[in-house]
């Protein structure tokens, strides 16, 4: 679960790995990473009313842009960053009250109007919109594949909080992170890792889907070399997770695997688990935001990654099969 990104939790056809666990090893990580994803345009994340000349302006009627739209073009100019949109708006004559834009709405390109309101006091236009071109959060690095130089992290999609939809990313990066404090999980109140970016870029973001984020590493990745286990080798009972609850120290904690869902129709929430480690329970109260992607280890093999928490019992949650993550990275 990513901090500040709703994550208590498109469709991608997977050709699952036709390999045995003995034929595939990866570097198992567990490190906290800071995620900075770049949108495929400028996202409208909210709107607000304002006053001009003591008149309340209620922005944007039905035929205009909407919250959740990605602005990808304005006045026939491509829009990638918020500065691109600001440049177009600043070039408009002061008596013009709108510009033509192209937005992506529900994955469909749509023509729309972005209405402008000139404020004589500041000699600038106001739009009444909150916009952004990237999304940030905290997650856990699951593995690094030394054969492909690809990493996998998070184990689930990134959700844009303002729209409750999957964030449409086209690039980005992951950086090293440091956990500075923990907000404990309570019933119906998921906790979180409070983390800060320590500045070292580990890799880029090339793939983002319901199975996590994936990309090429640009720095050496440390961890434990370990075989993977296919879903059919996983069993009920004791296992461990690897995660960080202080600074940048990766630790192992005890869990119990309580259910396994091997149906090919179920691609996420494959492993049901319960936190049993006294230290982890005392520190976090169970599964917290920022723990998504924490590797799940059983019998010395990597079997999956933590992804979701049960909000009515934060000691319990779900994980994804490592097979599914590895296949989704391709």
Image (spheres, helix red, strand yellow):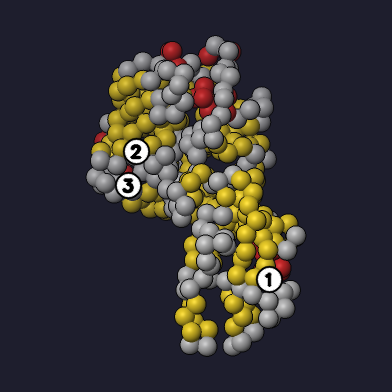
Residue with the mark numbered 3: 190
Dots 1 and 2: beta carbons under 8 Å?
no
Dots 2 and 3: beta carbons under 8 Å?
yes
169 on left or right of 158: right
Pinpoint residue 104: horizontal percent, then vertical percent: 61, 50
Q: Return the residue at label 2.
A: 309
The numbered mark, 1 or 2, whose residue comes first in the sequence reads 1
Quarter of the image with the C terminus in it: top right
Which of the two residues, 274 or 90, is positioned nearer the viewer here? 90
Cα distance between the residues tagged 1 and 2: 43 Å
**Closest to the observer: 65 or 294?**
65
Q: Nearer the viewer, residue 243 or 308?
A: 308
- Lower position in the chain sequence, tag 2 or tag 3: 3
CA distance for labels 2 and 3: 8 Å
Q: Position of residue 282 (x, y in %)?
A: 26, 42
Viewer-proximal residue among 218 and 236: 236
């Amino acid at each position: 679960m990513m901090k500040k990104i709703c994550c208590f939790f498109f469709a991608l056809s997977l050709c699952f790995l036709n390999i045995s666990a003995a034929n595939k090893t990866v570097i198992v990580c567990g490190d906290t990473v800071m995620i900075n994803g770049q949108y495929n345009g400028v996202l409208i994340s909210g709107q607000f009313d304002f006053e001009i000349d003591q008149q309340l302006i209620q922005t944007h009627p039905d035929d205009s842009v909407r919250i959740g739209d990605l602005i990808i073009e304005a006045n026939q100019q491509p829009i990638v960053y918020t500065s691109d949109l600001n440049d177009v708006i600043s070039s408009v004559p002061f008596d013009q009250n709108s510009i033509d834009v192209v937005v992506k709405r529900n994955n469909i390109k749509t023509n729309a109007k972005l209405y402008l309101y000139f404020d004589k006091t500041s000699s600038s236009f106001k739009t009444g919109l909150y916009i952004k071109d990237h999304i940030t959060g905290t997650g856990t690095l699951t593995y690094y594949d030394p054969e492909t130089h690809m990493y996998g992290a998070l184990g689930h999609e990134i959700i844009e909080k303002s729209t409750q939809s999957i964030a449409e990313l086209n690039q980005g990066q992951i950086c090293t992170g440091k956990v500075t404090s923990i907000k404990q999980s309570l019933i119906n109140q998921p906790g979180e890792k409070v983390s800060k970016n320590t500045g070292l870029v580990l890799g880029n973001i090339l793939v983002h889907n319901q199975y996590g984020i994936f990309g090429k590493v640009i720095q050496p990745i440390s961890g434990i070399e370990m075989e993977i286990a296919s879903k059919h080798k996983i069993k009920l009972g004791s296992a461990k997770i690897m995660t960080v609850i202080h600074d940048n120290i990766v630790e192992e904690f005890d869990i119990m695997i309580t259910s396994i869902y091997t149906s090919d129709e179920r691609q996420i929430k494959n492993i049901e688990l319960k936190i049993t480690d006294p230290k982890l329970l005392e520190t976090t109260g169970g599964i917290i935001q920022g723990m998504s992607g924490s590797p799940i280890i059983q019998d010395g093999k990597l079997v999956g990654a933590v992804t979701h928490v049960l909000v009515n019992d934060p000691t319990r949650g779900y994980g994804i099969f490592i097979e599914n993550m590895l296949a989704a990275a391709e």
